[in-house]
Amino acid sequence: MGGDSAPEMVVEGIDIALSRLQGAEFLLFGDEGQIRPLLDRYPRVKAISHIRHTDIVVTDQEKPSVALRTGRGSSMRMAIDAVRKGEAAGVVSAGNTGALMAMAKFVLKTLPGIARPAIATYFPTMRGESVMLDLGANIECDADNLVQFAVMGEVFARNVLGLTQPSIGILNVGAEGLKGNVAVKEAATILQETDLPIKFYGFVEGDDIGAGTVDVIVTDGFTGNIALKTAEGTARLFGHFLKEALTSSASSRIGALLARPALNTFRMRVDPRRYNGAMFLGLNGICVKSHGGTDALGFSNAILVAVEMITDGLNEAIKEDFSHVGSHRRDDPEATAAL
């Protein structure tokens, strides 16, 4: 029931995703009176879906703490509970991000060795794709949090992006080792000295994100969310300027017509719907957050992200890596215990 165009966007998104899925089934949590007529319009979805009725919905304006206390019977909470009970392999929601994170962390808990889950997503770059985390779950982070994000991001890049030895960089105000706050400096030292086979690049700056300098970009949620929203806004601004230029005169419109195949390729390459689906890494269960303003195509991609995380055994891989963590801070027993 979450998202600007739900539940129709969700049902249509499932229908689009089915063209790339085999053997999947769906539990749909929400108002049966609204969902049932939609399933009649999408027979493929109806054949593999089961409705779990509730008329309680977490709104976008609801505070996470309030949703956690009062939303036990909501569609969001019931969907997360289904993952905890083993009735579902993962949950996808376009609802309130803060509420989804709070509920998922409370119900599913975190994986061993992880203090805080992080929001991660794909980024298009000049070299392909990279993953960036955290994007808003943790406004303030210490060095141990950043190290945990780095390990989770590296595991994701290997198992989902298919990279043999992904490189990791910490987002900073400069590439020099003396720059940055205490947390990023300590995290860099830990990653340089860790026994894990991690390819740590060092510090990266904002322009390195689009350049694809590293495969995994690690930062706190405050900085990461600003970077994400800035990139999205810049892409929209660039698209606006391009459209304005291509429609400014008769000759430019003719040029745009001739360049339509290339422009279509460009539009598809930067289409944010292709990268929709932020992953909550570090939870003891698969949870993916779709952008609330996306359409059915974007939501289908969020579904595919969840399926890929499930089929690639991402959480088991994260557990495996964290089982080897512990010797990188021998001088700090409390930090080692936290990891």
Image (cartoon, rainbow, N blue to C red):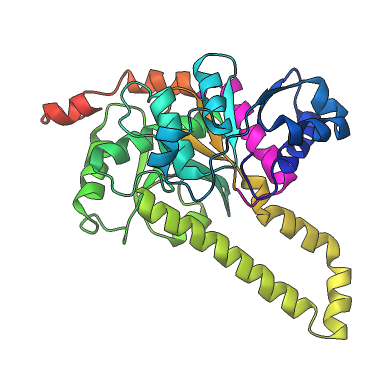
Q: Main secondary structure of the magenta part?
A: helix
The number of numbered badges drawn on the structure is 0
- Give the residue at x 65% y 50%: 4
Considering every residue shown, the one lying at the far bottom of the view is: 249
Query: Residue 22 is drawn in which quadrant?
Result: top right
| Residue 179 in picture, x, y percent from top left | 23, 59
Q: Is residue 251 magenta?
A: no
Residue 274 spot, x, y in % from top left = 67, 46
Position of residue 315 relative to residue 148, above or below, is: above
Q: Is residue 166 visible?
A: no
In the rendered image, the quadrant that contains the C terminus is: top left
In the image, taking residue 283 as reference, residue 312 lies left or right, namely right
What range of the chain is rendered magenta?
292-314
Residue furthest to the top = 86
Per the image, is 302 magenta? yes
Rendered view: 193 above or below 221 = above
Is 2 left, or right, of 189 in this rendering? right
Frontmost residue, 29 versus 18: 29
Could you say where residue 318 lies in the image, as x and y percent from the top left? Answer: 42, 24
Quadrant of the rendered image containing residue 290:
top right
Residue at x-position 48% and y-position 33%: 71
Where residue 186 sits in the image (x, y, percent)?
20, 44
Q: Residue at x 49, y 32 (%)?
A: 156
Image quadrant holding the N terminus, namely: top right
Taking depth in this image into account, of 301 and 163 the one nearest to the observer is 301
Residue 293 seen in render? yes
Q: Residue, x 22% and y 28% (percent of image)?
A: 338
